[in-house]
Amino acid sequence: MTARAADRARYDRATAHLDAPLAIVDLDAFDANAADLVRRAAGKPVRVASKSVRCRALLERVLARDGFQGIMSFTLAESLWLARSGFDDILLAYPSADRAGYAELAADPKLAGAVTVMVDDPAQLDLIDAARDGGREVVRVCLELDTSLKLLGGRVRVGARRSPLHSPDQLAELARSVARRPGFRLVGIMAYEGHIAGVGDAVAGRPLRSRAIRLMQAAARRELADRRAAVVRAVRAVVPDLEFVNGGGTGSVQHTTAEDAVTEIAAGSGLYVPRLFDNYTSFTGRPAALFALPVVRRPGVGVVTVLGGGYPASGAAGPDRLPVPYLPEGLAYDPQEGPGEVQTPLLGSPADDLLIGDKVWFRHAKAGELCERFDTLHLVEGDAVTATAPTYRGEGRTFL
């Protein structure tokens, strides 16, 4: 029996009493992935990206481990909710226009002490001030550095379009604006190198493309390391007591941690290891989060139909954004239909061994987005479900 077949047998036994659709997290794999992130971070704390987990119980589990410290959140409303739930070190990774949320933040010393907001434009400071509604608490601020690689005088750009702050001078100028402004305190710098951390460099069947990606990423790492160090020097000249410099992502942990300027690493997807993280040479994780759909039809030889399945991931639309049939091995989508809103036909010889009511196990393309489809995660240890935890959705929290 292959390792994957053994996993299927375990998951089927663990959930035999449960009807699909359902989602699980294999805690043995989750914990092994967490340990690997800590190993690769080589002594620097890992700040866990909540959007890649979206389950408070699992956030608590990973933060209880040595090597993890703090949360990187994705909306202000989520940040405030987590702070009220007892989490006390929350970095909001994206600027917000949530005026009501800023009013709450500025009025509550506990929230203001726990949450750091993201800024890359003085207009965002204006919005926060206008939203205070009498609140006088000091708002903790982090500046985001644009990590994109610019070539040919800026005519070619590689990387996500995030912050407009690219140079040390630009970040130092905004740091001065924050330092001069009452009611704000600059505490950190963040730089997410998505073109390095979030792009697989071993694309199956594409050796030339894979080599080009590796060459690009090597050049981008060198350029960013030099520029990030210069940015930190420039900002520390304005704010010497800067608390943290955050960088990284699951796919670049061991490279980013080698930079002296970086004090902590961000990662989250590496805990669940969705399918988009299969194509990396820098690390190998264990798939920990899966969902199961029930077989409801057998249309013919080599075909079964499962209920649901149309759970595409965000990003540029393409086949790599679709969930992948994982267990049993050997099933594939019908190219004429793909994963459907209500039903999904699956092709392949393993279909002939599946009966009505059997489970087919899938992996989502991305990590936390799976939790927007399910209210609960069944937590599996060995061949048993040992606990069930609500997702954000299960707690009535759909932040985006």
Image (cartoon, rainbow, N blue to C red):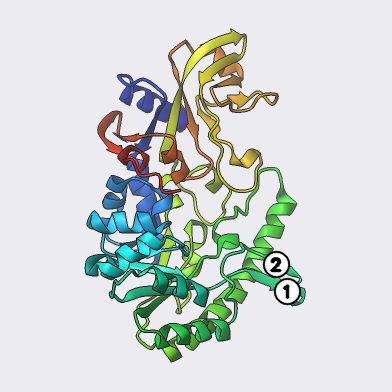
Element type where label 2 sits in the image: strand
Query: In this picture, is 364 found above or below 336?
Result: below
- Image coords of residue 196 (percent x, y): 58, 62
The residue positioned 49% from the left and 36% from the top of the image is 363
Task: State the image quarter where residue 24 is shown.
Answer: top left
Query: CB of mark 2 within 8 Å of CB of mark 1?
Result: yes
- Image coords of residue 243 (percent x, y): 35, 78
Direction from residue 386 to residue 185 in the image, left or right: right
User: Could you say which disc has been placed on residue 157 in the image?
Assistant: 2
- Image coords of residue 345 (percent x, y): 59, 19
Query: In this picture, is 28 found above or below 169?
Result: above
The residue positioned 26% from the left and 63% from the top of the image is 88
Direction from residue 206 to residue 139 in the image, left or right: left
Q: Do we see residue 263 in this rendering? A: no
- Image coords of residue 321 (percent x, y): 59, 41
Q: Do we see residue 267 in this rendering? A: yes
Question: In the rendered image, which residue does mark 1 sit on?
Answer: 154
- The amino acid marked with disc number 2 is Arg
The quadrant of the rendering that contains the N terminus is top left
Foreground of the two, 185 or 32? 185
- The amino acid marked with disc number 1 is Gly
Query: In this picture, is 277 found above or below 383?
Result: below
Direction from residue 259 to residue 87 in the image, left or right: left
Query: In this picture, is 14 found above or below 193?
Result: above
Element type where label 1 sits in the image: helix
